[in-house]
Image: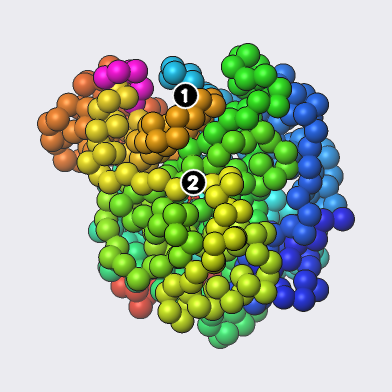
Amino acid sequence: MIRYFSTRDEKAEKGVSSAAAIKRGIAPDGGLYSPDVIPEVTPDFIDSLKDLEYSARAAKILSLFLSDDYSGPEIEAFCGAAYSPEAFPDGAAPLKDIGDGKFVLELWHGPSCAFKDMALQLMPRLLSAAITKTGEKRDALILVATSGDTGKAALEGYRDIDRIKIEVFYPAEGVSMIQKLQMMTQAGSNVDVCGIRGNFDDAQNGVKSIFTDGDIAAELDRRGLFLSSANSINWGRLLPQVVYYFSAYADLLKQGAVSPGERIDFVVPTGNFGNIFSGYLAYRMGLPVGRLVCASNRNRVLTDFFSTGVYDKNRSFYTTSSPSMDILISSNLERLLAYATGPVRTAGYMSELKKTGRYSIGESILGDIRDIFAGYCADDEETSAAIGRYWKERHYLADTHTAVALSCADRYISETGQERPCVVLSTANPFKFASSVYSSVTSFEAEPGYRALEMLSEATGIPVPARLSGIDRRAVRFPDVCDADGMRRRMLTFAG
Ligand SMILES: *Cc1c(COP(=O)(O)O)cnc(C)c1O
C-alpha cells in the first residue's frame, strides 16, 4: 500500500490513500501530499514501453501509484480517453530530433495548446472517480483563478465530467488576447467563466477568501457541493506528468538514439516547479537521468537557489515574455525539500518563508540536490535570440517558454561540455505567443490582435493551428466582467 503524507507531517502519522489525496488537494496542515515510497521500475519495464502508444505507457506508469484505489481497466479507460486522438491529434508528447544530440519534447498538442493539458486531461477523471471511491455524497465545484494557461486547460479537462462543476475567474485586462478568447468561447454544460476588474492577485485573493469562508462552505454543503481546486499542488496534477519523461526515453530507445541504461539530460522551463518535479519522480523511479536542468526567466529565484542554497523571494517581480513562468514562490519545491530533508525541516523552511520570505538549506543538502539538479536562466533578450537562432539554423519554431529552456540548454552544454542526449521540454504552441515569436523571427513588430497569428504563419509558412484558427470569430458564451466583490454572488448563482 502506498500512503500519501503531508510534506509537513512531522510524525508521519496522518497518511491517506491516493484517492483521498487527489480529492483533498492540499493537506490540512498546509503541506503537499507525497507518496511515502516511490515505486521503482526495472530496465525491462522501461524497454517494454517502447512499442506502446502514449495512453498505454501512461496506464502502466500510473498503475504503479494508483492500483490500491483504481482498477487496471479503470486506469486504462481514463488514459485512453484523456490521450485520445480527438484530444491530441498529433500524438500526446511527440519527440522531435533537432540535431546535435538535442531533442524537443512537445507537450502542447492538447486542447489548450499548452502543456497543462498533459495533466488536466487526465486529472478530472481521477478526481471524479475519487469522489465516488471516498464515499463523498456531494459533488465538487472547482474554483480557479488563472493568469493564463491553467484556466483554459482546466475548463477543457473538467467540461462535462460527471459530478463536477468548474468556474474560472481571470483578470479581464491581465491575460493575452488568445487566452481570453479561449476562455470566453468555452464549451461545456458544467462550466462558468467570468473576468475580474483588477489584476491576477485580486482574482486569486477573491478565490482564496471564498475557499476559507465557513458560511459559503455551509451554504454549498446545503446545496450538495464542496469546493475543490485544480492547481498544480494537487498530486493528481503531478502524477500524469511523470509519464512523458518515460515516454521520451522510450522514444529515444525506439529510434536507437540511446542504448538501454544510457543517461540523458532534461531541460525544463520552470515556474511553479511542478513539471520538473515530475521529472525528479521519474528519476527516483529508475529512469536513467543525468541532470534535470531547471530553466527560469528573469525571475531567477530558483537559479539562485540551486547555486547558493538560499531561497529568497524578497526581490523585484518582473513581467517577461514567458508569463507562465513569472513566479516568485515555486510551490512544488516543497516536495523536493521533503524528500531531501524530511518533514521536520521542511515545515521549518516553510514557516521561515512565510515569516521572512527566505530560508537557507545549507551546504550538505544543497550538495545532494545538485547531484541531480542544475539551475540556469535566460532574460527576454536571450530568449528572443534563441527563438531567432533555432528558427534560422534548425527550422524549429519555439514559443517563448520553450526558448528560455533552449537558451539555458545551450549555456549548460557549453559550460559543462556535457555530451549526453539532451531533451528540452516544450510547453506551449508558438502561435499562443505569436506576437513575441513573430518579432524574434523577423525583427519586426507584429500588428495587434489576431492578425499577429496570421503574420507569424505568413513569415514561417506554418499554418495557424486549427484550435486557434479563427478564434476571434467564434461565438462568445461568457462576456461578463465583475468586480472582485462580485465573485461570491457569481459563484453562488452558478452553484444553483
Ligand atoms: C505552467 C507553464 C510553465 C511552468 O510549469 P511549472 O509546472 O509551473 O513549473 C511553463 N510553460 C508554460 C507554457 C506553462 O503554461
Image coordinates of residue 188 in percent, x first then y, are 51, 48
Image coordinates of residue 248 in percent, x first then y, are 60, 28
Is residue 223 covered in magenta? no
Quadrant in which residue 165 is drawn: bottom right
Label 1 with label 2: CB-CB less than 8 Å: no
Q: CA distance from mark 1 to mark 2?
A: 18 Å
Q: How many marks?
A: 2
Specify whether tag 2 is near ligand 1 (CB below 8 Å).
no
Q: Which residues are magenta?
A: 392-397
Assign a secondary structure to mark 1: strand
* The C terminus: image quadrant: bottom right
Asked if 394 appears above or below 194 in the picture, the reply is: above
Residue found 80% across the figure and 33% down from its top:
42
Residue found 45% across the figure and 29% down from its top:
417
Q: Which residue is mark 1?
A: 102
Q: Which residue is mark 2?
A: 374
